[in-house]
Image (tube, rainbow, N blue to C red):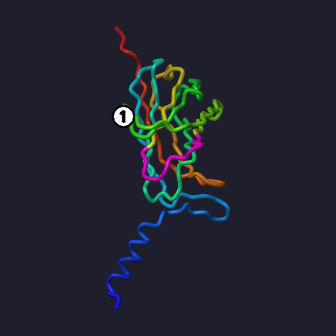
Amino acid sequence: MVNPWIVPAVVALQLAAAPVQALELDGQTWFRRPPWKVTFTNYYAYVGQTAATYYFTVTLPEQAGAGLGSLVIQQTRGVDRSFQFAADRTRAFVGLPRREGAVIPVQAAFNPEQRRITVQFPQPPQPGQTITVALKPWNNPFQADTYMFAVQALPAGPNPVASSLGFATMPIFDGVRF
């Protein structure tokens, strides 16, 4: 005789252990549980500095259901709209700035007219990972202001639907004058 408490427990364990799949509707790929925020870090906050790297960190939830296919980062605010990004120097890794883990291959493109950087992951980071994308501008903006970047995450899969992660805010200050 089978214990009536064991069967439901086994079924519950099987459901909990089953991998979560990406949600596909009408030929589009959606996150089941999308990442919900971006953390921004920049250690160089003065006008014109050339050593700046802009770090955008995203944690992909365990229940995301899909790997991270790409990030789209678009400047939405800031008076200097001419500073350029070196797309070929864009990189990504597992972990946080100054605590870098494994390297994640990327393909990046910068559209200067739209002020948009698209970072694609040929080998998508998987749910449960914290991923940091490091963007290299040629220099910080030459005008002090608060710059903002809208960030979207797209799942890996056919015809992905973007999830907004909010805005990264970057204050740029005038240098010290004597």
Q: Position of residue 122 (x, y in %)?
A: 60, 43
Residue picked out by circle 1: 99
Q: Position of residue 115 (x, y in %)?
A: 60, 33
SS label for mark 1:
strand
Magenta includes 123?
yes
Q: Nearer the viewer, residue 119 or 94?
A: 94
Whether residue 85 is visible, yes or no, is no
**Residue 5: quarter of image:** bottom left
Q: Position of residue 7 (x, y in %)?
A: 38, 82
Residue interval drawn in magenta: 120-130
**Residue 170: quarter of image:** top left
Magenta includes 160?
no
Q: Position of residue 162 (x, y in %)?
A: 57, 51
Tell me which residue sits at (36%, 34%) in the image. 99
Tell me which residue sits at (66%, 31%) in the image. 113
Of all residues, the one furthest to the bottom in this rendering is 1
Tell me which residue sits at (55%, 47%) in the image. 124
Of all residues, the one furthest to the front in this rendering is 1
Residue type marked 1: Arg
| Vertical relation: 105 (above or below) 154 | above
